[in-house]
């Protein structure tokens, strides 16, 4: 079955549920899914009901799509994303981005929890993603290219839309929020990185590391979607603090979620 025909079945199902006129896709990372609760007139669809949709397994990820209005925009939010380390293929991880595009979204907002590599970062900081490094050892576009999905060799020069970054920065400034900026480097996980890997990451230009986002943004670029990326620095990366654990990641997102939600909502209103 081709990707195009799978997508047709998925979006037909979603349209039957009342999903129409999507403007923005919203991918909510670990601990950041609560934003979907603020969507007005929500249509909620658990992943396991959607044809061809995978099911997410990570604690802290709800595993449902929420469609409705947020900040006056029609959004389709992914409350819980799919990770490569769960054993999904890169194509599966990025299927929801294809669905967003097929439902005529023009943009996606990607969010994640990640480790800070830049020594000026502190846990709890929010970081505007300016660019990314694919260190996951795979790429969702490997294989035959379906020309109607996008070009064989997509340009990644401005994967994170510059005008969106400028708007987010302006909003943050108006709010008196110290929004950091930087390059996100994707590792496959599920191990956290070693201190040596983090020194390497810093040397090659990473400001933050995580286990998501990179594949989705590659597919967004392939599909011609505009992208805004916001990371929550939940911890300092390996070797920069005592030890790492998922509990701290969840604790930090819990602590900054009010700030995070208001930044995303106000930025969304201005996009
Ligand atoms: N490394 C990778 N992924 C992460 C981290 C980290 O330090 N923190 C949260 N997600």
Image: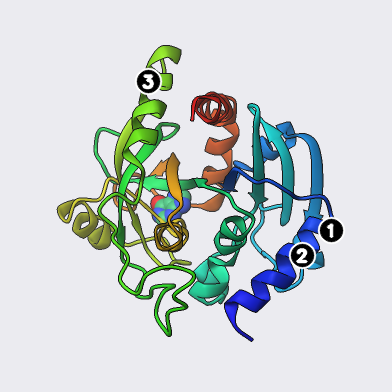
> Is residue 105 something one can see in this rendering?
yes
Alpha-carbon span between mark 3 and mark 1? 39 Å
Q: Earlier in the sequence, mark 2 or mark 3?
A: 2
Q: Which mark is residue 16?
A: 1
Q: Foreground: 45 or 195?
A: 45
Residue 129 picture quarter: top left
Contact, CB < 8 Å: mark 2 with mark 1? yes
How many numbered markers are drawn? 3
- What residue is disc 2 on? 12
Q: Foreground: 34 or 161?
A: 161
Q: Mark 2 against mark 3, which lies toward the viewer? A: 2
Where is residue 120? Give x, y as percent. Answer: 25, 33
Q: Is mark 3 within 8 Å of ligand 1?
A: no
Q: Foreground: 142 or 138?
A: 142
Under circle 3, the secondary element is helix
Q: Earlier in the sequence, mark 3 or mark 1?
A: 1
How does the figure colour the protein chain or chains?
Answer: rainbow
For the point 41% across and 28% down, which residue is it? Answer: 168
Contact, CB < 8 Å: mark 2 with mark 3? no
Left or right: 157 as drawn, with respect to 251: left
Where is residue 213? Give x, y as percent. Answer: 45, 56
For the point 57% across and 28% down, which residue is it? Answer: 265
> Is residue 244 something one can see in this rendering?
no
Alpha-carbon span between mark 2 and mark 3? 38 Å
Q: Foreground: 261 or 255?
A: 261
Residue positioned most to the front: 148
Under circle 1, the secondary element is helix
- What residue is disc 3 on? 170
Location of the N terminus (image quadrant): bottom right
Q: Is residue 125 above or below residue 7?
A: above
Left or right: 109 as drawn, with respect to 177: right
């Amino acid at each position: 079955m081709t990707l195009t025909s799978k997508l047709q079945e998925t979006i037909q199902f979603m349209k039957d549920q009342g999903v129409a006129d999507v403007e923005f896709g919203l991918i909510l990372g670990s601990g950041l899914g609560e934003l979907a609760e603020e969507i007005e007139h929500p249509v909620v669809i658990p992943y396991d009901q959607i044809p061809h949709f995978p099911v997410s397994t990570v604690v802290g990820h709800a595993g449902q799509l929420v469609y409705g209005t947020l900040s006056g925009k029609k959004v389709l939010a992914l409350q819980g994303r799919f990770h490569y380390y769960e054993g999904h293929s890169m194509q599966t991880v990025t299927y929801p981005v294809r669905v967003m595009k097929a439902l005529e979204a023009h943009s996606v907002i990607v969010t994640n929890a990640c480790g800070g590599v830049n020594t000026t970062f502190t846990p709890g900081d929010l970081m505007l993603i300016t660019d990314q490094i694919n260190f996951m050892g795979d790429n969702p576009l490997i294989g035959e290219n379906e020309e109607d999905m996008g070009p064989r060799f997509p340009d990644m020069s401005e994967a994170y839309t510059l005008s969106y970054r400028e708007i987010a920065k302006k909003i943050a400034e108006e709010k008196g929020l110290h929004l950091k900026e930087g390059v996100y480097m994707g590792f496959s996980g599920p191990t956290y990185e070693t201190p040596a890997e983090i020194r390497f990451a810093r040397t090659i230009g990473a400001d933050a590391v995580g286990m998501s986002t990179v594949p989705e943004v590659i597919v967004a670029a392939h599909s011609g979607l505009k992208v805004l990326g916001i990371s929550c620095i939940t911890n300092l990366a390996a070797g920069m603090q005592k030890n790492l654990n998922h509990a701290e990641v969840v604790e930090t997102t819990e602590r900054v979620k009010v700030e995070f939600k208001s930044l995303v909502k106000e930025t969304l209103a201005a996009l």
